[in-house]
Amino acid sequence: MDTTTPNMAEHLEAIGRRLRQKNMRLTQPRQQVLEAFLNSRRLQTPQEIFNNAREQGINIGLTTVYRMLESLSELNLAKALLLHGEIRYIFCPPEHHHHLICNNCGLVEEVFNCPVVQMPTGSFKSQSHQLDFYGLCSRCQVKDTALNPSGEASK
């Protein structure tokens, strides 16, 4: 049974077309991994993506996961971010946006209203920018407060 919504199916088809332009076929296992990656909303290492695929019974190699992440990154559909000394990836929609990243659980929220676009830069002409915020999501804030009632930020 196909559980993808029509919007998700259209999204996957568009990504598949772009991946084929980079000479990567979107096989059924790759599509399943891609769909899980799209829906995760968490930063993941390539190894975590691979392990999650294997746990779901998807037969895909770790090298294929790396190639897919590289292709998605080149197409600006994935972004590599450093968290706790590890490079982790998040799927990125094509619209300009920024990230709110939880240092504890790796949850990522996207912010599409960019305040930086209107920022005066004088004679400097900005061609692009990146702006990501690291902190604690609301769920991890509650956990942090329960574990550390003094109100001091835990490390």
Image (tube, helix red, strand yellow):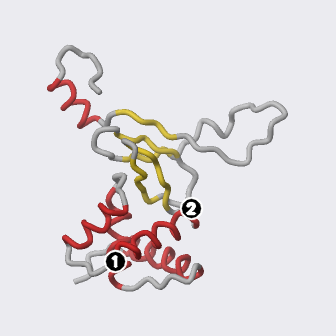
Residue lying at the far right in this picture: please name it: 123
Tell how many labels.
2
Q: Is residue 79 above or below residue 27?
A: above
Query: Mark 1 falls on what kind of element?
Result: loop
Tell me the quadrant of the picture where the N terminus can be found.
Answer: bottom left
User: Percent position (x, y) of residue 53?
Assistant: 26, 71
Q: Seen in the image, is 1 located left or right of residue 39?
A: left
The answer to which of marks 1 and 2 sits earlier in the sequence is 1
Residue 36: image quadrant is bottom left
**Quadrant for the C terminus in the image:** top left
Q: Nearer the viewer, mark 1 or mark 2?
A: 1
Residue 91 position (above or below residue 8): above
Identify residue type, mark 1: Gly
- In the rendered view, tell whether residue 8 sits above or below residue 98: below
Position of residue 87 measured from the top left corner of the image (x, y, whole percent): 43, 52
Few, some or many residues within 10 Å of mark 2 (<14, 14–19, 20+): some
Q: Separation of disc 1 and disc 2 at Cα?
A: 23 Å
What residue did someone put label 2 on? 76
Across and down, in percent, residue 114 comes to 58, 41
Q: Residue at x 18, y 32 (%)?
A: 143
Disc number at residue 61?
1
Judged from the image, the secondary structure of the residue bearing numbered disc 2 is loop
Q: In the image, what residue occupies the spot 58% across and 52% down?
A: 96
**In the displayed structure, does residue 126 sit left or right of residue 6?**
right
Whether residues under marks 1 and 2 lie with C-beta atoms below 8 angstroms apart, the answer is no
| Closer-to-camera residue (55/1) | 55
120 vs 145, left or right, is right
Assess disc 1: are there few (<14), some (14-19) or many (≥20) residues with their C-alpha within 10 Å of its C-alpha.
Answer: some
Q: Amino acid at mark 2?
A: Asn
Q: Residue at x 46, y 79 (%)?
A: 13
The answer to which of 140 and 62 lies nearer the viewer is 62
The quadrant in which residue 40 appears is: bottom left
